[in-house]
Image (tube, rainbow, N blue to C red):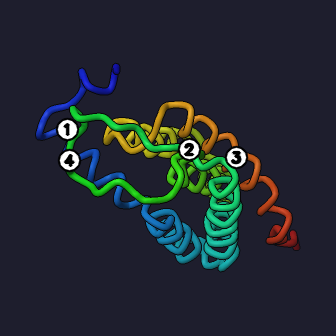
Amino acid sequence: MAAARLRSPEVDRGVTSYSRLGNSGLGWVALGVVVALAKRDARPAIATAVAVWGTLGVNYGVKLIAKRERPNLEDAPQTIEAPTSSSFPSSHAAMSAAAAVVLGDAVPFARLPLKLAAVSMAYTRVHLGVHHPSDVVAGYVLGAVTGRVARLFVPARRRR
């Protein structure tokens, strides 16, 4: 696996730390709060929470149907405990993509960095051996869709 060539104790520690920011989407929701505070507008925080946690709910529904086994990679870093839920699709990838969509609306100049941060989060799950590459691709696509749907629930600021 290509991710195995990138593994080293230093890289594994950094990847593990970044991946943990995605647990339950808390890092993304926190970023939404920071954006909301900076803009003095609650909508980015609300939209991020709706997108991230709504996506998590949809994702778990898909996991219940898919019931895919997680990879059994003996060479994977043992820096996190593999989740017990189905591997398909990746919740981290899904929540990250959804957050990138709604936060990109709030901070348009940051769209590319947000997408790169989301793709990086998705990669961490393959690097750590807890997802197959197709899990993170499917999760990312799911999150991109649910992020767009979540935007419908949080109205844009009215122009004066």
**Is residue 35 in view?**
yes
Residue 77 % position (x, y) = 21, 41
Q: Is residue 128 above or below residue 18?
A: above
* Badge number at residue 11: 1
Name the residue type under label 4: Gln
Quote the CA–CA distance across marks 1 and 3: 28 Å
Name the residue type under label 1: Val
Q: Residue at x 20, y 47 (%)?
A: 78
Residue 135 % position (x, y) = 55, 39
* Badge number at residue 68: 2
Q: Which residue is mark 3?
A: 142
Quote the CA–CA distance across marks 3 and 4: 28 Å
Helix, strand or loop at mark 1: helix
Q: Which residue is mark 4?
A: 78
Is the C terminus in the top left, top right, bottom left or bottom right quadrant? bottom right
N-term-proximal mark, 2 vs 4 = 2
Q: How many residues crowd around disc 4 within 10 Å: few (fewer than 14), some, or many (20 or more)?
A: few
Considering depth in this image, is 40 or 58 the residue closer to the camera?
58
Name the residue type under label 3: Leu
Tag nearer the camera, 1 or 4: 4
N-term-proximal mark, 1 vs 3 = 1
N-term-proximal mark, 3 vs 4 = 4
Name the residue type under label 2: Arg
